[in-house]
Image: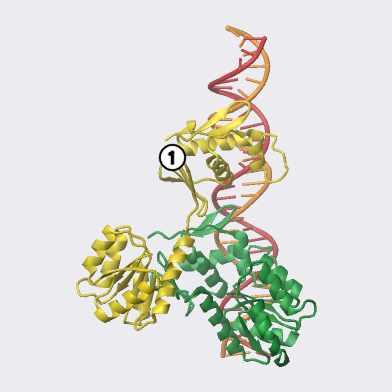
Chain colours: A yellow, B green, C red, D orange
Amino acid sequence: MQLLLVEDNQTLGQAVEIGLSQRQFMVSWVRTGAAAISNLNRHEFDIAILDLGLPDIEGERVLQSIRRKGIDIPILVLTARDQTRDVINLLDAGADDFMTKPFDVNELAARLRALLRRRSGYTSAKIACGPIVMDTSSREAFINGREMMLSRKEYELLQMFVMQPMKVHPRDKLEALLSSDSHLVESNALEVHVHNLRKKLGQRELIETIRGVGYRLKCKD
Amino acid sequence: MQLLLVEDNQTLGQAVEIGLSQRQFMVSWVRTGAAAISNLNRHEFDIAILDLGLPDIEGERVLQSIRRKGIDIPILVLTARDQTRDVINLLDAGADDFMTKPFDVNELAARLRALLRRRSGYTSAKIACGPIVMDTSSREAFINGREMMLSRKEYELLQMFVMQPMKVHPRDKLEALLSSDSHLVESNALEVHVHNLRKKLGQRELIETIRGVGYRLKCKD
DNA sequence: TGTTTTCTTAAATATTTCTTAAAATAAATT
DNA sequence: AATTTATTTTAAGAAATATTTAAGAAAACA
């Protein structure tokens, strides 16, 4: 696990570096805010520890600068002040957690692990097919990076298609997917939904009609 | 915090239920081992208190049954003074802590909190998501740095949202979170709570409705 | 205990989504 | 080409789902 430690105090920095190295973190230690920013640009870190009270740039500005660049790794802030006000501001500025000095290295390590765990808990289950991307966790659907607002049945239909692209889905299977009950659909509900989906997709040749059988999703690039 | 209390004694059960409710636990109280097992299957509890000397099933068997099903929430066992010799067996069977009756509810609450803390490895006390910041130790919630006065259920709901922003939380999961009992909610209690939460958040588009599925918290800036 | 807050319920309203059916279009068959 | 058959499109009403109120019940508080 690649960790960036931003800490100007020699004693504290060394203690953290040693303590975390022993706990399976790969620690890179820098002393200034400027170094922190350039390092986060260059390298791919998994997580960062940021001390406030840096010599060059104020901690909050470092934080903002990092977040503005779209770097969204978890950041744990070290602070001497124990004032709720500051902490709220920091969390607003993009910090994920904070600890007041002095602290126990065990707890620090535990919190870092918790942050990493929480992050991976977000794992968005994404499925894609050509220009279509779906996130089954947030239930979002995109076409060429643009979000589509899909109704429940449209979403379920598209998900079925994206999960098995190029497969021909028989019309009766799709109708069963749409009708909640064993309630048989006697009308052209399926066709209407496909029509609305095509409209939202823009490129309507993406869903191909297999006459007399059903539909399939084409996924060319 | 969802807690399952397994206790057949009326007086003791009531005392614990009241005492822990006052300390921000959401208590579901069942009287039998069978009920305990079925409840742990259905709901998502964070922690459980199990009295030995249940009328139907022996406590140790209940414990084994729970663990065999892969339910690994912390379990604190209540024993009478003359049962202390069984404690070793219980801890082997998967108990996390025990207390001998009679006990002080303050101590019980403290131990429960310790178990929860130990489990999550110092779960960070503060969590944030966009303009929302929550302090899970002091139970405060802020929007744009301003504190919101949330009722218990509103708080539980928002915490769930903030812990997994953008994730779609199915309505039945959220209903289970709100109903302390196995008492099924047949009404629109969830909707009303969401409505009140939105009102307190000010920006009511933060909680997005996923029609037919549930809700999710949007956390962009 | 009485008082206050919070929770649940239910009804009224609002909104979105689904189904239906009919007309228009396209493909296949004769 | 004319006919038949299948699919697409449109639009409107029906059904499902969500929001908002308000009031009584339950719980927490003092």
Residue A45 placement: quadrant: bottom left
Relative to the observer, which residue lies in front, C18 or A141? A141
Looking at the picture, how far across and down is residue B30, in whole percent? Answer: 72, 76
Which residue matches tag 1?
A131
Relative to the observer, which residue lies in front, D22 or B24? B24
- Residue furthest to the right in view is B56
Image vertical order of residue C26 relative to residue A107, above or below: above
Chain name for mark 1: A
Q: Is residue C30 left or right of residue A217?
A: right
Dot 1 amino acid type: Pro
Q: Is residue B163 visible?
A: yes
- Residue furthest to the front in view is A22
Q: Secondary structure at mark 1?
A: loop
Looking at the picture, how far across and down is residue B218, in whole percent? Answer: 45, 59
Residue at x 72% of width, y 38% of height: A184
Image vertical order of residue B93 relative to residue B213, above or below: below
Looking at the picture, how far across and down is residue A185, in whole percent? Answer: 69, 37
Q: Is residue B182 visible?
A: no
Looking at the picture, how far across and down is residue A209, in whole percent? Answer: 56, 29
Q: Residues within 10 Å of mark 1 (few under 14, many from 20)?
A: some
Residue at x 64% of width, y 69% of height: B179
- Residue furthest to the left in view is A56
Q: Is residue B81 left or right of residue A54?
A: right
Q: Quadrant of the C terminus of chain B?
A: bottom left
Image vertical order of residue C17 relative to residue B148, above or below: above
Relative to the observer, which residue lies in front, A64 or C9? A64
Q: Quadrant of the N terminus of chain B?
A: bottom right
Residue at x 75% of width, y 78% of height: B31
